[in-house]
Amino acid sequence: MTRFAKLFFGFVVALLLLWQVPWAINYLWVKPIDTPFTLYSEQLNDFVMIQRTDDGPTYYDRKGKEYSREEFDALLPLFFARQLVADGRFPEQIAGRTISPREAQVGNFVFRSMPKEINKPTLGLYFMMETLSGRVDLEMPDDAFRLTDRGIEFIDMETNSVKEDKSARFSDMLLKKGARFPIRTIAGNPTSRKEYDEGYVLLDADGRLFHVKMVRERPYVRAVTLPEGVALEHLFITEFRSRRTLALMTDREHHLYALAMPGYEIKRVEGVEFDPTNDDMSILGTLFNWTVCVTDEDAEHYYAINADDFSLLDSMSFPLDQSHVPGLSFTSSNDEFVRLRIQ
């Protein structure tokens, strides 16, 4: 028994050393890389950056030319529209087009996806809000729905009973539009803290794409035709203020697609490769272009995307130094699970 206790004690000490020693070395000697905040300028047709330093931020373009803060604002008139309006400097035309400050602000959006949001368990309960309630503010429903092998099942939250009629209406409409259960993937944004609601996008058992929402208490279902050979894997509903896109999607080859509205047209976001389970992605969008940043293990990759046809305007990367002492860990920034792993 004494021998076993010594062996167990030695094992615990070794485990703690493998865990804490690499952590301490990385904490003391490995410095995080501070990459600049980067956007694509429709005035320069090139990337511009903000680098934080001990003396304050430095504003410069890809060629290294530095700018004052006011000059930098003018290089991004859509992104800094509010500041330029306050200064009385908002231009009459931008890239040859007459744009009002209101149009500029409506066209701006921010999108963010992180692996830990994808690699986590789901509750399996969703909320379907009324799209045309007649009220300015959206309201949360008094029921929730879950996906079953036979359809959609709505549950009254007060009585915990199934709403048979409502469940049958939505399930039958999906079947009528060609969906096959069980539903493989579903994505929505069930919160009343937004300007409008577009319900959910989902993939059925055969990988076909559908848009589902509730309009005047009745189901609205639209089957969306996928391009030949495209097998979608992950879905993200957007609900941007401009309503120019309904969703972002990735396929099994990690290509990025946008579901453009109002015609439900699926367009490839040219040049962008993104694995939601491993990569961070952010998009800062304007009426003219999107600045897409995909961060993987090796680099921060920036893509300038035309906001009209999703073609690639330009790209650049900032390499990331991943040198660190490997060791044991119990958590990861890529998920919310606690388990033993080597990092």
Image (cartoon, grey):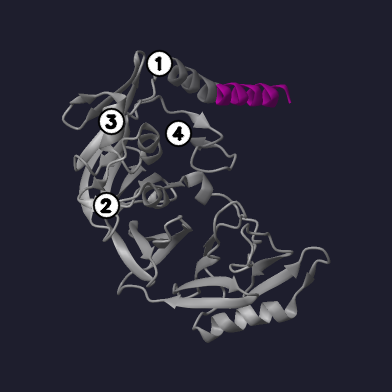
Give the number of the mark in front: 3 or 2: 2
The residue mark sitting in front, 1 or 4, is: 1
Q: Which residue is mark 3?
A: 72
Which image quadrant for residue 284? Answer: top left
If you read the primary sequence from the N terminus, does the residue marked by circle 2 or circle 1 appear first?
1
Residue 130 position in % (x across, y down): 63, 67
Disc 2 from disc 1: Cα separation: 52 Å
Contact between labelled residues 4 and 3, with CB atoms less than 8 Å apart: no
Q: Mark 4–mark 2 contact, CB under 8 Å?
A: no
Disc sitting over residue 29 in the figure: 1
| Mark 4, residue position | 343
Q: Residue at x 49, y 18 (%)?
A: 24
Q: Amino acid at mark 2?
A: Thr
Residue that appears at 83% across and 66% down: 159
Which region shows up in magenta?
1-16
User: In which quadrant of the rendered image does the N terminus lie?
Assistant: top right
Question: Relative to 81, is 29 above or below?
Answer: above
How packed is label 1: few (under 14 Cα within 10 Å), some, or many (20 or more)?
Answer: few
The local crowd at label 2, few if under 14, some if 14 to 19, many if 20 or more residues have their Cα within 10 Å, is few
Of all residues shown, which one is farthest toward the left?
A: 63
Residue 98: which disc?
A: 2
Mark 3 or mark 2, which has the lower sequence index? 3
Question: Residue at the location (72% across, 22% down)?
Answer: 2
User: Could you tell me residue 332's position as x and y percent?
Assistant: 51, 37
Residue 67 image-quadrant placement: top left
